[in-house]
Image (cartoon, rainbow, N blue to C red):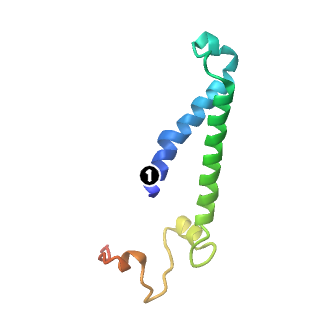
Amino acid sequence: MQRLVYLSLAAVLLPVQMISGFLYWGYNDWTRWGIGWLTLDKVAFVHTAGAFAILCFVIVHIYMTTTGHTVTAHVRAMITGWEEVSEGEVQEWEKAGHRQPTV
């Protein structure tokens, strides 16, 4: 799921934002560019919807960092590269029947 979200963000949402922002910027030249049929309402809706989607992504992303053992556990793990796990605690991947990776 995470890979699909990042792919859609990078391959769809950000280019849509850039294109609609460029169209906003060049509104006075639309007829010269041959896109006079396009309305500012449509571009504004697409640009605003994209901005709302990015905002939702950021809010959910920040919220997900607070869902660890403590509020800062996931942030600490991102910075240090290590996550503290209590001895005997069963991890999600262990519950699924996967073998522990060997290093």
Q: To which residue does mark 1 refer?
A: 4
**Residue type at numbered disc 1:** Leu
Of residues 82 and 2, the one drawn nearer to the viewer in this rendering: 2
The residue drawn where x is 61% and y is 21% is 38
Name the residue furthest bottom: 88
Residue 23 rendering spot, x and y as whole percentages: 63, 25
Of residues 102 and 7, the one drawn nearer to the viewer in this rendering: 7
Q: Quadrant of the C terminus?
A: bottom left
The residue drawn where x is 45% and y is 86% is 89
> How many residues crowd mark 1 within 10 Å: few (<14), some (14–19), many (20+)?
few
Secondary structure of residue under mark 1: helix
Above or below, comparing residue 42 to residue 76 in the picture? above
Residue 95 rendering spot, x and y as whole percentages: 37, 80
Residue 87 rendering spot, x and y as whole percentages: 45, 88
From the viewer's perspective, is 21 left or right of 9? right
Residue 24 rendering spot, x and y as whole percentages: 67, 26
From the viewer's perspective, is 94 left or right of 37? left
Above or below, comparing residue 32 to residue 27 in the picture? above
Find residue 42 and report its image quarter: top right
Of residues 53 and 65, the one drawn nearer to the viewer in this rendering: 53
Q: Quadrant of the N terminus?
A: bottom left
